[in-house]
Amino acid sequence: MTQDPLAQDPMTRCPTTPDSPSEGPARTGRRRGIGPAGTAGRVVLGSYFVASVAWGHWSGPFRPAAWALGLVGFPAVLLLWQWLRTRRTHTRLQATGPVSHALSLAVPLALYFTPSYAPALFLTSDAALLFYGGSMLLAAVRGYAGCEVLAVSNWLLRRDDQVGCAVFWPVDEVERRIHR
């Protein structure tokens, strides 16, 4: 049975049969992109991030706005951005160069340290930990090898767009080479 080459996924409007990984849609398969060390690292660090916020809110003042921003707000912004991007181009995002890796460290650090330079936005620190921690846990469960910042939106849009990940890329790359 031959699939129509012009068929589109109704959710992403992406063609369902890519000609090549760089030209077709960025669809995900069932194969895990990370090995045991990458999975364990994401589980440990993601759990630590989420648990540190939970402990702080349990032992101190509970701030539901941080939870809403980290678990709904940040993912919604990235989902909207990625969805709009798929409307312009169906090609897979492959931003894995040095600038993308640097930004994958700079943005979370800027969000985490916001209370030190913009005290009125102190909630972004806990929200960033919840967002990145939750995304790491989702990536571990799904076996997603990309940067955690796109784990939720890639899952919901059924894509495999990639941005640099300075934290887990070295582990994933070593495991990928070992398991070739």
Image: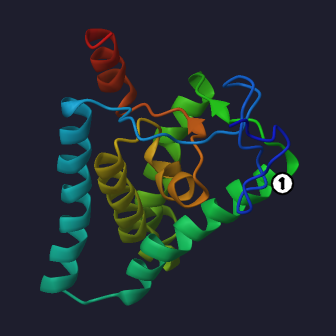
Count of numbered circles on the image:
1
Front in this rendered view, residue 49 or 11? 11
Front in this rendered view, residue 81 or 18? 18
| Residue 15 left/right relative to 145 | right
* Residue where numbered disc 1 is placed: 87
Q: In percent of the image, x 63 and y 66: which residue is there?
A: 77
Q: In percent of the image, x 41 and y 70: which residue is there?
A: 127
Give the quadrant of residue 23. top right
- The crowding category of the residue bearing disc 1, from other C-alpha atoms within 10 Å (few below 14, some 14 to 19, many at least 20), is few
Q: Residue furthest front?
A: 1
Horizontal and vertical percent position of residue 175: 28, 19
| Residue 34 left/right relative to 155 | left
Kindly identify the amino acid type of the residue bearing the numbered disc 1: Arg
Q: In percent of the image, x 34 and y 61: which residue is there?
A: 134
User: Please, is residue 14 above or below residue 128 in the view?
Assistant: above
Q: Determine the secondary structure under disc 1.
A: helix
Q: How is the image coloured?
A: rainbow
Give the quadrant of residue 62. bottom left
Residue 141 seen in render: yes
User: Please, is residue 165 above or below residue 63 in the view?
Assistant: above
Assign the C terminus to one quadrant of the image: top left
